[in-house]
Amino acid sequence: MSEQLDLVKLIADQSASIVEYSKKKYPDRVYMFEFMNNYWKDVINARESGKPIVMCPPNFPMELIYALDAVPFVLEQVPTRLASGKETFKYIDLAEQYIPATVCAMDKIILGAALSGDFQFTPDAFLYCSLPCDNARAVYPLVAEHYKTPTFCVDTPYRRDKIGYDYIAENFKEAYEFLQKALGKEHNEERMAQVIRNSNRSAQLLTECSKLRRFQPCPLPSRMTIMNGMVGSTMGAAYPIDFLEEQLASGQKTAARHGGVTPGAEKYRILWLQNMIWSNASIMDWMETKYNAVSVMDDFGFQTDYMVSNPYDMEEVYNVLGQRSLGYPMVHGACGPAEKYVEMTEACMESYSINLAIYAGHVGCKHTWASAKIISDLVKEKYNVPVLTFDLDSLDIRYKSTDEIKQIITEFMETLESNEKQA
Amino acid sequence: MSTSSKLLASEELDSFAKAYVDQGGKVVGTYCCHLPEELMYAANLLPYRLRATGCKDDSDAETYLSSFSCSFVRACLQQFMDGKREFLDGVVGSDGCLMAQRLFDTWKHLYKDGRFYHQFNTPRVTGPRAENYYQTEIRELIEALEKHYQVSITDEKLWQAIEVYNQTRSLIQQLYGLCKGKEPRVTGEECLRVLLAAMSMRKDTFNEMLSAFLEEAKQRKPITNYRARLMLVGSALDDPEYVKLFEKAGGLVVTDVHCFGSSYQWELVERISDDPVECLAKTYLNRPACPRMCNLHAEFCDHILARAKEYMVDGIVFMRMKNCDVWGGEGFNVQEMMKKAGIPLLVLDREEIVANAGQVGVRAEAFLEMLETEGNN
């Protein structure tokens, strides 16, 4: 029997070490790792101080949790944080004793970690959403049942119209009422207003950073597309604002001198059509260096922004949070009717001057794989842009190693360059 | 051909849809048991439940849906690509699960031919808010059908459709009733074949045929030469040959919980108000038909257990279609519950195109042997 691990502390300690290491080795990246570190510090502090912790998925609005002076523990942050290492193996193996191996590793790690007891705390409340996918829909209720803590399910609709927005807003209103009861907290108008101001600012900055990536050359590094994915899990807190302001300032500075992030002239502007390679973010750095190829945008990260104009108007708050949630990565394009995925891809292709696309299909993401051909054909036929398609497990490096992935990319890039020379 | 033979000839069932088209009728494909077929029936259409019975190769569909998709959905798409669904005038897509959604998406992508396409969304929770949302979806589908087919779907027509469908449900319950008790008259394979027929023809026709079948079946001698009473639970199962594997080994499938079996149509739509849409929404949303419903997991497992007890089941075969996440997750709950209840459970992974019939037969044989040994002890 393996020794009980304090997983949250392990990740928090690792995050703190990365900050210290980067201060010496990559001082320009410290702000990125500080952001990550702040998230884990928050959870650790809450656990130690007895502040309420709410387990939830990233597409639930964190604002409703922060507004009650509680801390969100976004379960997806655990697998994505552990993705590059071997720590995931035992959780995946444990989960596979109960659910099929074909379930997404994201959810297997979450279930395995919960069943193992390695989180070492029981949340004060548990929230989940019926989308973005069947994996999450199947596994979250199992985790909730394991903790036997007050639970609420938000029904995320497919519709992206007034009926859909109203429906999800009503869901969030009820979820907020549930949280107040479960946590024994009361709504505080001023606190909510501040949280909403914070999240408005984060949303605005995130949009500006995304717009900056349209510049040629792209003034922000490829790996920021992955880092920015974490912002959604912190909306409403103050610290992501520091991170995004610094990111924006850094990008603006580079853009002002018409600089980019590749050592030579920027040659390829890449759109990732499915999940990001969470387990192998360093591959993006490698592609910048080796091929002057920048990952400019990804289909799952691109978001349309909505702002709350009056943070004291709760009806507006629920409505905007609903619209944001339906525009959240995975929910926005990938989980509903394929037309939305197509629209998302078209928007990215047209706004970011893409000349290369990669469909690195995470094997657990079966419903997006089931539209891979529609999306790839669109990119190839409508935009005449080459697409590299391959499978990987973004969270389990046993499926395909970094070297194997690099080999696949190398062969594709070499073919591409050879074709260019011949043309 | 006798009524029974027609009803049980699953391979020939499309002839009913084709005949309906020849007579000037329209056939609309559906997917998911949370879609009220009564709406289409009231529009004088034939709602045809999409399936893949008999599919032997899904390689063309795999090009679109990838090898990581649900093989049932892949095989359903293959039927389209092979031209076997040409009699359909349209499809009402559903977000029952995301794989089903992709079947609809891909079909729409491939066949831009002016047929009737409608996206129907069913909430994944129950409760008053979800019921209101679901009612909106139903009303929108009614509007879309009226506009496309130039028909009027009045309340009166809806009530008539509900009555016909309630009769179907009662007859299906009677059919399963013939498996209940110590003297079963029909096999699990026959039940599935009858249900496939229900999904392929207008329900008025089906009701007549099933009534005749029931009269005939009641006169049969009881089935006594079986080793154990089995229940099939899990992902979509539209292949009678698969059921046959268990019955050939000596089991008798006396009941089931899957969307091509009793979950297709069972609970009667009650007249709780004068609004047929409200009544349909209430019944369809709350029925324990599929683990897709997020807040019904406990009720769903209770339903499986109650059914197992009611039909005096000796063992349950839990079938997980590869890449079916919804049932994959539910397996956790079902296994826990059956362990507590002391009901033996065999978990089998399966694909729509059965390439391992021999292996399934061996597993079935071993399970039956285990049940017999336990029974003797």
Image: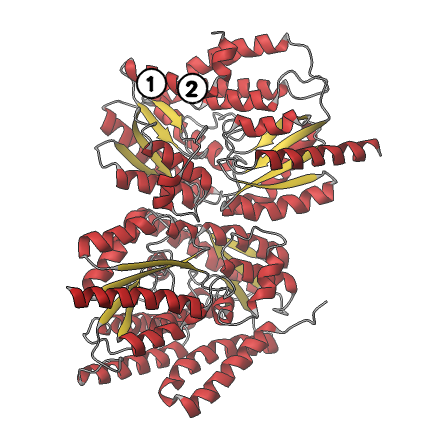
Q: Nearer the viewer, residue B236 or B171?
A: B236
- Tag shown at residue B18: 1
Extreme bottom residue here? Answer: A24
> Which chain does the numbered disc 2 sit on?
B
- For the C terminus of chain B, the quadrant is top right
Tell me where residue A289 sits by quadrant. bottom left
Q: Residue at x 51, y 39 (%)?
A: B351
- The answer to whether A283 appears left or right of A352 in the picture is right
Labelled disc at residue A193: none
Mark sitting on residue B13: 2
Task: Indicate the position of residue B253 as horizontal and vertical percent values.
Answer: 63, 27
Where is residue B104 shown, x and y percent of the image? Answer: 34, 39
| Residue type, numbered disc 1 | Lys
A49, above or below B227, in the image = below
Q: Nearer the viewer, residue B310 or A384?
A: A384
Residue sitting at x 35%, y 77%: A285
Q: Note whether B45 is above or below A25 in the view shown.
A: above
* Mark 1 belongs to chain: B
With A254 as the anchor, is B327 left or right in this view? right
Residue B82 seen in the figure: yes
